[in-house]
Amino acid sequence: MTAADGPEEWPFNRMSSLFDVTGLSALPDFADDFVPTLDRDDGDEIVPVNWNRLGPDEARQAWTDLNAWVTWLRKAFGLPPTLIPPLWHRHDELVWELSALHTHWLACYGVDASPSAPIAWMRDFADARHRLRDWVAACGTRLDRDRPTRTTVWPGEPPEAIASDQAITDREADFARFVEDDAASRHRSDPGGAS
């Protein structure tokens, strides 16, 4: 193929899409699905999310952002439920890991990031996939069923009830209910309702 083949045929005419700021143009088209952007119109710097310190409104926004990014990540990289199961949001170990990975992605693909930052993210993403696989195996959540993560009871602690598996019938409805329950519990722990 040569330049004489015309602008549509010449492969270098399509190369500019591979060098966009985010690197997202080369990813598969997900139709109306979320594709993450790095536009931060709130002017805030990128900081880690400390889920223990969020007020109700901050938590709702953090859940929404993380859920959209995790959905994109799962689809963009074809990740199986052994890495990201449908009810990841119900397992603290997965929430903290995915939240850290999301924050790292934002920092590595931001306009001020080093040109080599994306490859650092990819390396760290490879490490995170190993941890995610371990977390999913330990917590017992699957594609079609879920149960709370079992923890070891230490000597002197009261025994915990063993929860049975629950079928997953509507992931989106479960997520919406979970976020509202989480926000309500944050209101109870912060009666002033500060967010």
Image (spheres, helix red, strand yellow):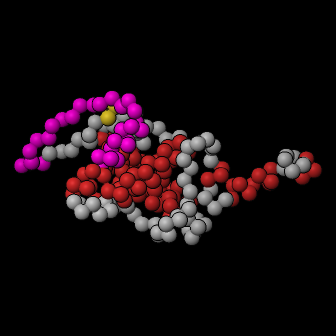
**45 left or right of 21?**
left
- From the image, which quarter does the C terminus lie in? bottom left
Q: Could you say which is closer to the camera, residue 79 or residue 166?
A: 166
Q: Write the start and end of the magenta stretch as one range.
A: 154-182
The answer to if 163 sits in the magenta stretch is yes
Q: Nearer the viewer, residue 41 or 83?
A: 41
Task: Please tell me whether residue 14 is drawn above or below residue 172 in the rendered image.
Answer: below
Relative side of 129 to 50, left or right: right
Q: How many numbered discs sit on the rendered protein?
A: 0
At 77% from the left edge and 52% from the top edge, which residue is drawn? 14
Tell me: residue 156, above or below residue 44: above
The answer to if 194 sits in the magenta stretch is no
- Taking the spot 46% from the left edge, 69% from the top edge, the residue there is 44
Residue 92 pos. (x, y %): 31, 49
Residue closest to the far left: 156
Q: Nearer the viewer, residue 87 or 122?
A: 87
Q: Looking at the picture, how far across and down is residue 47, in whole percent?
A: 42, 66
